[in-house]
């Protein structure tokens, strides 16, 4: 669960260096390369930067991924600077005129358009601010996918009422805009759909097939070329089973089958968590161990203000204990043996729990705890300023 470089670095840190985030960039590159190798050549791999936009992470992925999907003006300016040569696709609902203007100024390669109004706004701004350019557009559609495919999925962005994407009934209006006065500014390249998160390979393929079929039908009905289809991200990450991986080989083979049906098509995927979740660790130490009304608790330096993932997703973050033998005090060292223990942080809220009733062989004050799978939706989704504790250190290995 911990790579050797991370284990070595944690061992070399002092207590005051903790908590710390550690990223194994070589492991990230190896994982991303294996994902890339499992995909057919005609599948483009974009990384959804919002999962973890740290500049060294983006830089480590560049050259392996085709490009980066960014979700705000801030992310796109940041990604442009961190990976200057890489193609960017700008998605996200509620793009402001200022964000669109920034995207045009920075020459963003592709826009994922979320509504007819946004399409008109983009067309008007492009005609005014970038008259020499034709802006490439994918229409993000909220498709009614067959419900079986989405069974048991935690977070569904589509196939039901959501603020995301264009309703299939409104696509005709968008196509009329694309054929209107701003025709010279905008070029429709295809369809985008990001419908769910947490799908295994079989479910993800079922959804991808439905998106490609829907795009092909639209292309036929309106006699317009739609050479690109982006089937989104959301490939499953299983926090209960840190060794498990999304079945990229099966997914790649299935995408090859879709491509066989549509010879002129370029398919694109944009996973976030499934690329970076495994490359990050949050390391800290046990400050105290105590018993409360019959249950054991370890209080850790840090907490969910640094690693909000378990609170946000209501799961137990997987971890490993790195024992330390140094105990500087003359009194007995608090600890448990062969116990179930809840790992809590320093915040004054009962929600500050990183793992509940976890089985440990031994855990004592002063031992180190390293949480795995902290490379995506971890530091960047956390409420850092709550209680004003110091920020963690960051180590890119
Ligand atoms: C968040 C997001 C992704 C990535 O989702 P993961 O679950 O991290 O793979 C991809 N596309 C869009 C449009 C998103 O909003």
Image (cartoon, rainbow, N blue to C red):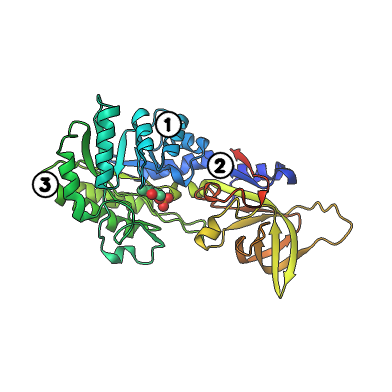
Kindly identify the residue that appears in the image at 55 percent across and 59 percent down: 310
Tag 2, which secondary structure?
loop
Give left or right: position of 159 versus 284: left
How far from the left and from the top, in percent, is residue 327?
Answer: 82, 53
Q: Residue furthest right?
A: 330
How far is disc 2 from disc 3 in space, using C-alphas? 48 Å
Q: Which mark is residue 317?
A: none
In percent of width and height, residue 198 lies at 40, 58
Q: Earlier in the sequence, mark 1 or mark 2?
A: 2
Q: CA distance from mark 1 to mark 3?
A: 35 Å
Give the residue number, with chain letter if any, for mark 2: 24
Q: CA distance from mark 1 to mark 2?
A: 23 Å
Is 316 left or right of 37, judged from the image as shown? right
- Label 1: which residue? 80
Give the labeled residue for mark 3.
Answer: 222
- Tell me the quadrant of the picture where the C terminus can be found: top right
- Report whether 36 appears left or right of 1: left
Q: Quadrant of residue 151?
A: bottom left
C-beta proximity under 8 Å, tags 1 and 2: no
Q: Position of residue 221 (x, y in %)?
A: 10, 49
Q: Can residue 66 be seen?
A: no
User: Which of 379/30 is in front?
Assistant: 379
Whether residue 124 is visible, yes or no, is yes
């Amino acid at each position: 669960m911990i790579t050797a470089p991370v284990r070595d670095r944690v061992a070399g840190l002092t207590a005051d260096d903790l908590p710390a985030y550690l990223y194994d960039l070589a492991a990230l590159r190896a994982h991303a390369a294996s994902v890339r190798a499992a995909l057919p050549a005609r599948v483009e791999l974009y990384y959804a930067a919002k999962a973890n936009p740290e500049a060294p992470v983006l830089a480590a992925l560049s050259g392996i991924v085709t490009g980066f999907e960014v979700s705000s003006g801030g992310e796109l300016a940041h990604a442009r600077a961190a990976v200057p040569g890489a193609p960017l696709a700008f998605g996200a609902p509620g793009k402001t005129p200022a964000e669109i203007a920034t995207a045009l100024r920075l020459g963003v390669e592709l826009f994922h358009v979320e509504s007819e109004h946004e399409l008109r706004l983009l067309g008007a701004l492009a005609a005014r601010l970038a008259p020499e350019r034709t802006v490439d557009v994918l229409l993000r559609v909220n498709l009614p996918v067959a419900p079986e495919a989405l069974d048991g999925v935690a977070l569904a962005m589509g196939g039901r009422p959501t603020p995301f994407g264009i309703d299939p009934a409104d696509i005709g209006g968008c196509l009329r805009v694309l054929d209107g006065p701003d025709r010279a500014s905008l070029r429709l390249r295809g369809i985008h759909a990001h419908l769910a998160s947490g799908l295994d390979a079989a479910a993800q393929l079922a959804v991808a097939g439905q998106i490609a079929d829907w795009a092909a039908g639209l292309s036929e009905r309106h006699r317009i070329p739609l050479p690109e289809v982006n089937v989104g991200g959301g490939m499953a990450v299983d926090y209960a089973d840190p060794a498990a991986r999304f079945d990229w080989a099966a997914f790649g083979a299935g995408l090859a089958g879709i491509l066989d049906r549509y010879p002129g098509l370029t398919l694109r995927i944009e996973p976030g968590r499934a690329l970076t979740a495994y490359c990050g660790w949050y390391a800290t130490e046990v400050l105290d161990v105590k018993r409360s009304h019959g249950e054991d608790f370890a209080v850790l330096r840090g907490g969910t203000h640094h690693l909000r993932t378990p609170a946000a997703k209501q799961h137990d973050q997987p971890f490993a204990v790195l024992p330390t033998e140094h105990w500087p005090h003359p009194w007995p060292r608090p600890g448990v043996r062969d116990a179930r223990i809840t790992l809590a942080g320093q915040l004054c809220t009962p929600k500050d729990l990183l793992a509940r009733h976890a089985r440990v062989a031994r855990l004592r004050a002063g031992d180190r705890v390293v949480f795995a799978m902290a490379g995506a939706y971890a530091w960047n989704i956390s409420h850092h300023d709550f209680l004003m504790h110091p920020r963690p250190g960051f180590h890119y290995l």
